[in-house]
Amino acid sequence: MRNVYVCFFILSISLSSLFSISAGAEEEAGSGSDDTPVVLDEIAGDRNLTGARNWRSPEYSNQQGALGWSPGVFNVPKGLEINYQFWVDIYTKYTTDQGLLHDAEYIDLIYEVLDFTHISARTDLTDIQKSKFRTKAVKEGKKRIVALLKKLQTITDDSKLNADEKRIWDYFQKIQEKKKFLAATTKARLRFQLGQRDRMVQGIFYAGRYLEDFERIFHEAGLPVELTRLPFVESSFNVLARSKVGASGLWQIMRYTGRPYMMINNTIDKRNFPNDAAKLAAKLFRFNYNMLESWPLAITGYNHGPAGVQKLTKLYKSRELGDLLLSNGQKRRLGFASRNFYASFLAVLEIEQNAPKYFGPVFWSKPLTSVEFTLGKPIRWKDIVRWFDGNDQIAQIYNPHITAAARKFGNLIPKNALINILKEKKDLVQNEFSPPPTKWPSPKTEDGDLERVESPAKAEGPHVYTVVRGDTIYSVARDFGVSVQELLTANKLEATEELKTGQEIKIP
């Protein structure tokens, strides 16, 4: 099992709300680090959907027996102090209307702080235009920095430098490279990072819908409860978070990671069902820790892949994460996202645990007022939306595991699938799935003979289903709860026959 699991280790893009790069092979190769977006998608959740409640400070003590846990196990390790402080600042000092132009290698080297407030305040611009203006500001800022670094490469006398130039000049004095200023102009080094202060406050609010369940799941799995805070890093608790490389859900799990656990089909993607995804994340963490025997390494492995981290421990002959962050002239090393994954996780642990210190009063959302319902027959997404009074967005927030194929193309959601419905709609939904009561006539006719009455289903005849892309005889039979042979016989089909999109078939 161990070797099978390695084949499917997680290569998720993590820090999806912070980084626009993916983890995995590209990271191991030490490729250049990309910027974060200049704007972030709004956290899907509809703040007015639930009321607010008092925030609760997390309790992390007395976890004896949890795998690898001890007091201080999540203290900042040696070598990560600077990275940790960088992310504390990103989460608490700078909003999403601000951003830093900084060095990706020497992360505390901040060249400029960009302020986009004047762009956000403009009422004459569309969101797309505002994004373009922000992008332009970042590009122009980088051009200024590149010009300055090229100038400093030629300087031998720093007496004529202004204060900002002198600050950068002084920082580089500790770097022992012949062309150190020119090296800092490369795409891999000069990086933009958007602030996250307001995003963190929003994430704390939405976390109130899920954290209590996550804490229970990780406690029952015998894992440190601190791990439940990883979605702050991965998704900001945006339940509809999807990455451009395929990571999905609050835990940003890659498709090929979820597939071996039967998490995904053409209508259901349980990576996006918060509690199911948390259970899978718990399994992945346990596996990572058993392989790497260290939480700093195991958590980094969630982003970079545990096998990749294990290779680096052998290459550097060290199991200390701080040692793996150093390049030491080696070709294989952690890329930017993986180098900063554990540090940003520690930063959110500190910040969320002491949220009032950083943000003043903070609140949790009340839990979603929903109940789980098992479908008694196949239905379409439009039926679910109807139970949410026609609001597609809210239906998705409650049911993020229903795929785009089911929502946009009408793929049938199969019988026995689990969905969330509003508590107040439970009776309505149950009634829709209950067969209408049989109206029995008087036992005898006027002539004295017994009267026979067909059941409503038989009186209406067989159901006719229109085939959609991807359907097979087996999948249709499964979805409608009939045998393959019954379906073949009712439609005079051969077992080897392929269904065609638009074809109408009878469901016996």
Image (cartoon, rainbow, N blue to C red):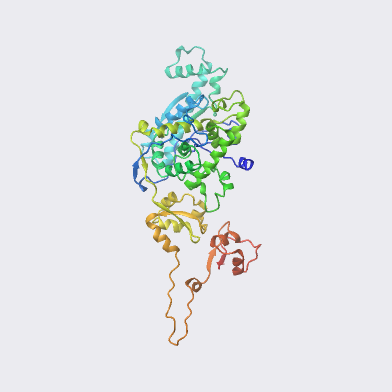
Front-most of residues 241 and 161: 241
Left or right, 54 with reference to 227: left
Q: Quadrant of the N terminus?
A: top right
Front-most of residues 445 and 471: 445
Residue 200, above or below 506: above
Q: Quadrant of the C terminus?
A: bottom right
Coordinates of residue 283 in the picture (x, y in percent): 54, 42
The number of callouts visible is: 0
Can I make out residue 207 in this image? yes
Residue 502, above or below 108: below
> Residue, x 49% and y 30% (percent of image)?
73
Coordinates of residue 150 in the picture (x, y in percent): 52, 21
Coordinates of residue 48 in the picture (x, y in percent): 35, 46
Coordinates of residue 426 in the picture (x, y in percent): 40, 58
Residue 93, above or below 156: below
Can I make out residue 97 in this image? no
- Asked where in the image residue 440 lies, by quadrant, the reply is bottom left
> Residue, x 57% and y 50% (percent of image)?
262
The residue most toward the bottom is: 447
Left or right, 385 with reference to 487: left
